[in-house]
């Protein structure tokens, strides 16, 4: 192969795979460090400075005293064992993720542990096992940039909040959970403005963190952003967290806006999310309005809309002639001819709405009757005395 062809091949490799790594980058292999306390951790050594090893893992960067490291080995064998363990799990449910997370934790396989914890949180955001580990790991690992402010100064905490939210922008749910755990240790009063701002304008992990932090506050300003997320966020994890945050300070009035949205929400998605929130809220008073809303889906003359395609042509229909001071004045009379079609449509299938309402009714009553309005109406007549009304 001549020099020209070699150069062409190198250009193609760079364009497909990115820049050719330097010698230092090629030497950074994933390793497993064993520490004096018996702990093992997998990652990449970034640098060693003042007898401290800066170790990058999938959980974040960790500073490890060089004297505490008693062994170091390559991670490729552990990675192969993890792949074999993955093949044993037939389905990816919370139980499977938990089993693999325990396996990774016991062997210090940090990248696998991160993947399994993220899987647990996506399926069950409040999982006790996952959060127990996260609260233990969060103080040890750092995902945000270094805070250069003096720690004894009040501005350190404000800067820390900014750095943590910035780091959360493109994180996995696990990364967001680690950051949320770190925010929990900072004063609530300095977090309110950031939480309100990111609840509306943030990425999914930032919104998830923000609505949780709003639940830690008892300020009235938190309420409106939480209802907006609960009734309008595209992520069910964010909606669930927003409802949980509202529930923390429920004085019996939290149900009201959700009930109004259930009947008068401008969009179908708003009404579906309102039904979902009523189920998660757990207020038994929601049973009656949910059944009423379910019955309303069978009422004729429901939601309708139309599409109109038309063309208008203006023309002079006549002249209004007047004689004034020996002069003839002719005012034209304009008319318009309109032609076109109007397509009138009505909602025929409300299956999604009914399924969400019946799921919330099942959460509140423990009764599974499907999503038939007739069945739920019969059940309500027989059981309404057991449920509080509004």
Image (cartoon, grey):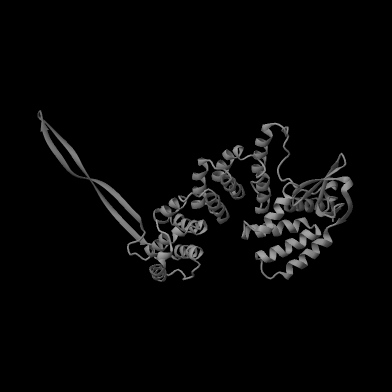
User: Which residue sits at x=49%, y=66%?
Assistant: 362
Position of 19 relative to 83 (above/below)? above
User: Which residue sits at x=69%, y=34%?
Assistant: 156
Position of 197 relative to 7 (above/below)? above
Q: Nearer the viewer, residue 142 or 374?
A: 374
Residue 147 vs residue 27: left or right? left
Q: Nearer the viewer, residue 266 or 28?
A: 266
Q: Position of residue 155 (x, y in %)?
A: 67, 32
User: Which residue sits at x=34%, y=55%?
Assistant: 308
User: What quarter of the picture does the C terminus occupy?
Assistant: bottom left
Residue 112 vs residue 382: left or right? right
Q: Nearer the viewer, residue 53 or 370?
A: 370
Q: Residue furthest top?
A: 325
Q: Position of residue 36 (x, y in %)?
A: 87, 52
Position of 377 relative to 122 (above/below)? below
Q: Position of residue 180 (x, y in %)?
A: 65, 47
User: Which residue sits at x=66%, y=69%?
Assistant: 91
User: What quarter of the picture does the N terminus occupy?
Assistant: bottom right
Position of 202 relative to 369 (above/below)? above
Residue 327 vs residue 175: left or right? left
Q: Position of residue 314 (x, y in %)?
A: 26, 46
């Amino acid at each position: 192969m001549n020099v020209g062809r070699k150069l062409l091949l190198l250009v193609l490799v760079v364009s497909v795979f990115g820049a050719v790594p330097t010698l230092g980058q090629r030497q950074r292999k994933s390793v497993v460090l064993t520490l004096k306390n018996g702990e093992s951790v997998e990652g990449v050594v970034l640098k060693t400075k003042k007898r401290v090893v800066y170790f990058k893992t999938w959980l974040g960067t960790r500073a490890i005293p060089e004297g505490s490291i008693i062994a170091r080995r390559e991670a490729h064998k552990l990675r192969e064992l993890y792949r074999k363990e993955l093949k044993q799990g037939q389905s990816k449910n919370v139980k499977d993720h938990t089993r693999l997370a325990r396996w990774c934790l016991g062997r210090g396989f940090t990248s696998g542990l991160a993947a399994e914890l993220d899987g647990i949180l996506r399926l069950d955001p409040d999982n006790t096992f996952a959060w127990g580990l996260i609260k233990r790991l969060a103080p040890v690992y750092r995902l945000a940039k270094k805070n250069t402010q003096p720690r004894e100064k009040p501005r350190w905490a404000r800067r820390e909040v900014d750095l943590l939210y910035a780091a959360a922008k493109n994180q996995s749910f696990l990364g967001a959970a680690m950051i949320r755990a770190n925010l929990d240790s900072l004063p609530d009063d300095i977090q309110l403005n950031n939480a309100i701002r990111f609840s509306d304008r943030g990425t999914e992990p930032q919104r998830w963190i923000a609505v949780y932090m709003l639940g830690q506050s008892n300020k009235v300003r938190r309420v409106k952003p939480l209802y907006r997320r609960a009734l309008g966020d595209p992520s069910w994890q964010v909606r669930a967290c927003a409802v949980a945050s509202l529930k923390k300070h429920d004085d019996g009035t939290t149900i009201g806006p959700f009930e109004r949205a259930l009947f008068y929400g401008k969009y179908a998605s708003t009404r579906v999310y309102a039904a979902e929130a009523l189920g998660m809220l757990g207020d038994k008073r929601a049973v009656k309005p949910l059944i009423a809303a379910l019955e309303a889906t069978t009422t004729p003359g429901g939601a309708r809309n139309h599409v109109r395609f038309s063309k208008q042509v203006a023309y002079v229909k006549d002249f209004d002639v007047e004689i004034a001071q020996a002069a003839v004045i002719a005012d034209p009379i304009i008319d318009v001819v309109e032609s076109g079609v109007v397509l009138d449509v009505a909602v025929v299938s409300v299956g999604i709405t009914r399924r969400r309402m019946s799921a919330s009714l099942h959460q509140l009553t423990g009764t599974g009757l499907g999503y038939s309005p007739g069945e739920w109406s019969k059940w309500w007549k027989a059981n309404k005395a057991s449920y509080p009304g509004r």
